Amino acid sequence: MSNSVTSATYIRNLSYSLRRRLSDFLDPQDRWKDVAGSIRKPSGELRYSQQHVRRFEGLAAQGKSPTAELLNDWGTANSTVGELVDILRSHLLLAAACVLLPDSVKAVTSVETSPERTHGSSSTRPLEETEAPSSSSSSDPLPPLPLQDDEAGHAGFSSFFYNELKSITGNFDDRPASAGGSRLGEGGFGTVYRGFLNDKAVAVKKLNAMEDMSPDELRAQFNQEIQTLKALKHQNLIDMVGFSCDGEHPCLVYSFMANGSLLDRLACMDDSRPLCWRRRCLIAEGTARGLEHLHLNHHVHRDVKSANILLDEHFTAKISDFGLTRASAKHTSTTVMTERIVGTRAYMAPEALRGDITPKSDVFSFGVVLLEILSGLPPADENREPQFLMEARYDIEDEDEDLTLEAFVDKKMTDWEQSQVDSVYSLACNCLHDRKNRRPVIQQVLSELKGVVKSFSLDLQT
Ligand SMILES: Nc1ncnc2c1ncn2[C@@H]1O[C@H](COP(=O)(O)OP(=O)(O)OP(=O)(O)O)[C@@H](O)[C@H]1O
Ligand SMILES: [Mg+2]
C-alpha cells in the first residue's frame, strides 16, 4: 500500500492497485502525455519521442491504459517514485502525486495557500479571487483546498462559502424536498440537497469523508474532480456550478435536474408519470452520447447506472458522478464488499468484479440500464427471481422458461414498436456479453440507438 512507498521506491515495484489509481488520474484528458513529455534519459535527452507517444495512443485505442503502459516502460529504466512525483508536481497533478507520497502534496499546498482573504460582498466569486475564509462552524473544519485556480476560474465555476450553501439549503434540511425539506437523495459519497441561488435551483452534494482516505487525499481528489468536470463538458454530462471547500464538508454544486434520476422516473417515484417509449429511447441515446464523450477522452465512468443518469426539465439525459467515482479506491474495490459495492454489483461486468475496469465495463453497465428502460424493473430486487436484472436475458432466451420479451416489456408504456424493442433488446444483450471483447464499443452502441430514434421520425413522416 501507499504507506510503504518512499521516494526511493522503484516504479517497477509499485503495486497494481497504485498503478491503477495513477491511471485513473492520468488517463483522462491525456495527462499521461504531460508526464511522458517530461521524462528524461540520464543524458538529459527526452526519453519519449512523438513516435513513442503515438505507440501509447495506439494501446489506449485498444482499451489499455496508456499510463500503465508508460509506467511499465519507464519502470525498466530504474526510475523512482521521487522522479515521478517531481514531474507530477511540476504539472500540478497533485492528486496523482498524493496517491504515491501524500506528504509531497502537503508541501506544495502550504506554499500555495494564502492564509487570509476577506469575504467579498457578492455571494459567489470567481476562483482567482478567493481563498476560503475560516469557517464559523464549531466542528473541526477542513483547511482550505489547494485550488488549481487559474484554469478552473476560466471555466466559470464559482467558489462558495460553506455557510452560504448551508443557508440556501435550509441548514441542509434533511426532510425530503417533496415534503418541504431540501434533501434530494443520498449516495455513496454524501447527501444531495436542493437550494436556490438567485432563484436558480441547484443541487448541493455534501461530501462525507471516507475512511480509506486521508483529509489531504480527499482535498486533492476533490480538486481533481473539479478539473475533470471542467475538461469534460458536454450536453449529456451534468453541469457543475461551483463548489465550497472551507467548511466541515467539501461540497459540489451542480445544476438542478428537475426530473430527478432515471431510476426514480422508471419507478414512477412521487407519482411521476411513466416515461413513454420514445422518451426512453431518447434518454438512452443521450446517455450513449455522454458516454462516448467520456470514452473518447479516455475516461471510464465506472459507475454507470440509472441513479447516475439525471433528467433535466426537457428530460435530456445528463450523466453524473463521472469524476467522483475515482474518489475512493474502496468504491471500486472488488474485495471490500461494502453495502455500496453490493448495490452496484447489479451493474458490474464479470471482469470488473475482478478489478479489470475498461470502457467495455461501462458498456456492460449500460446494457443493464437498457434492460431497465425496456422493462421498467429495478436493476436488483432480492425478492425477485432472477435477483439481478442482467440475468433476465437468460430466461428470455431459454425456451423452457416462461419469460418472453413481450412479457418483459414495461406495461406502463404503450407506444413501442416490436422492431424497435427487438433492436434495443438485442443491443442490450450484446452490451452484456460476458466476454468484454465481444461487446460493442460505445460508438457502435450510439449508432444503433440513433437508428432506433431515427425510426420514430420516419414513422412521423409516413
Ligand atoms: N443535480 C441533481 N439534480 C437533481 N437531483 C439530483 C442531482 N444530483 C443528485 N440528485 C438526486 O440525488 C440522488 C443521490 O445522488 P448521489 O449521486 O449522491 O447518489 P447515487 O447516484 O444514488 O449513488 P452514487 O453515490 O453511486 O452516485 C440521485 O439519485 C438523484 O435522485
Ligand atoms: Mg450519483
Image: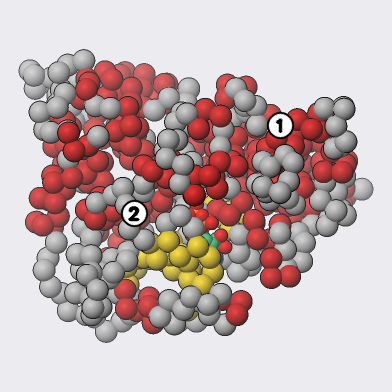
* Quadrant in which residue 253 is drawn: bottom left
Quadrant where the image shows the N terminus: top left
SS for callout 1: helix
* Quadrant in which residue 250 is drawn: bottom left
Q: Which residue type does callout 1 highlight?
A: Cys
Q: Is residue 451 visible?
A: no
Q: Residue at x 23, y 60 (%)?
A: 145
Q: Residue at x 18, y 45 (%)?
A: 102
Q: What is the crowding at mark 1: few (fewer than 14 residues within 10 Å), some, or many (at least 20)?
A: many
Q: What is the crowding at mark 2: few (fewer than 14 residues within 10 Å), some, or many (at least 20)?
A: some
The response on whether ligand 1 sits within 8 Å of label 2 is: no
SS for callout 2: loop
Give the residue furthest to the front: 383
* Quadrant in which residue 206 is drawn: bottom left
Residue 378: percent from left, percent from top: 68, 50
Which is in the foreground here, disc 1 or disc 2?
2
Relative to 49, does residue 83 appear above or below in the rendering?
below
The response on whether ligand 1 sits within 8 Å of label 1 is: no
Q: Which mark is residue 31?
A: none
Q: Earlier in the sequence, mark 1 or mark 2?
A: 2
Q: Is residue 27 visible?
A: yes
Residue 56: percent from left, percent from top: 36, 22
Give the residue furthest to the right: 462
Q: Is residue 126 left or right of residue 371?
A: left
Q: Is residue 35 left or right of residue 252?
A: left
Give the labeled residue for mark 2: 210
